[in-house]
Amino acid sequence: MQKQSANICSTMGRSEELSEFQRGTVVGCYLCKKSVREISAMLNLPRSTVSAVILKWKRGGITTALPRSGRPHKLKEEDRQVLERVALEKCLPSIKALTAEFQSASGASVSSTTVRRELHEMGFRGRVSSYGKPKGVPKVAKKQVDVSRLDLRIGRVVTAQQLPDTDGLFVEQIDVGEAFPRTVVSELSQHIPVEQMQNRMVVLLCNVRPVETRGIVNQAMLMCASSQDKLEILDPPNGAIPGDRVTFQQFPGEPDKELNPKQKVWEQVQPDLRTDGQCVATYKGAAFEVAGKGVCKAQTMSDCEIK
């Protein structure tokens, strides 16, 4: 009997429902004068399970499994599937809102308590609003702050004139390859005669947020080499045309649509904008370049900041 029971033991699991054959084996061991402890050890079953099988046999002479205890599901299987889909797809803020959405989708009339219990049995845990969010998805890295975030383009000054009632401001209309010229206000009149501005090719920062200057909306920033007492407009390479993009070989990437002043991108990038010993405009040593046409330069100012 012991050898036969050992073979049966290998097919029995502590968490599985016992088969009729397994229950009969428990009763058979009991009839062979085995104690509950011996049967439990021999068949690898909890003592409580062994005792329950023997007690039921004593009372009714049967070993058929009784229905399991525990609260039955109030929802049909198809309604449970609807509830799971609503929980995953809607990302609702509360169990009350999820219950209302489920009732609308399924037509079932249940309480929020029932919905919460059903969800718990399905394995949903934590805040309702987090049910539809996949776990383990890496966060999107913050965009690196470098010169690639600046939208630098070649422009041509269409018109330039001194702003009335000011000592140093020009207002220019500059073609950057768009449907209409951009209006730019620049503090240049003390450094460059207005006549030298007409039809001039320039480098513009085009994704600054428009701001009002003396009642005029300024839509871009003119790039210049600058020192305490001197200023020179950067010259694009020969053959460059309005709208050409200025790029940097070591810093690929697309510019922001518009620079967010709160992120202070310009303020972080500008200190590394300088002309080198040959007057070439650079960012951390990488030249302001128009693909296939050359680099941007100042006329005479070397080793100076650009702003």
Image (cartoon, rainbow, N blue to C red):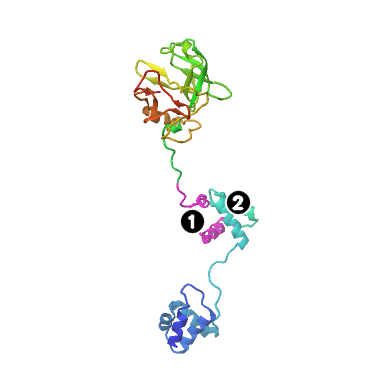
Q: Per the image, is 122 magenta? A: yes
Q: Residue at x 47, y 50 (%)?
A: 137
Residue 201 on image: x %, y %: 48, 19
Specify the quadrant of the image occupied by residue 73: bottom right
Q: Which residues are magenta?
A: 110-138
Q: Per the image, is 163 magenta? A: no
Q: Disc 2 marks which amino acid?
A: Glu
Question: Is 186 located above or below residue 130 in the figure?
Answer: above
Which mark is first along the chain, 1 or 2? 2
Q: CA distance from mark 2 to mark 1?
A: 19 Å
Give the structural element (helix, strand or loop) at label 1: loop
Query: Alpha-carbon neighbours of circle 1 within 10 Å: few (<14), some, or many (≥20)?
Result: few
For the residue pair 240 and 89, the one nearer the viewer reads as: 240
Q: Which residue is mark 2?
A: 101
For the residue pair 118 and 286, the one nearer the viewer reads as: 286
Question: Is 294 located above or below residue 125 in the figure?
Answer: above
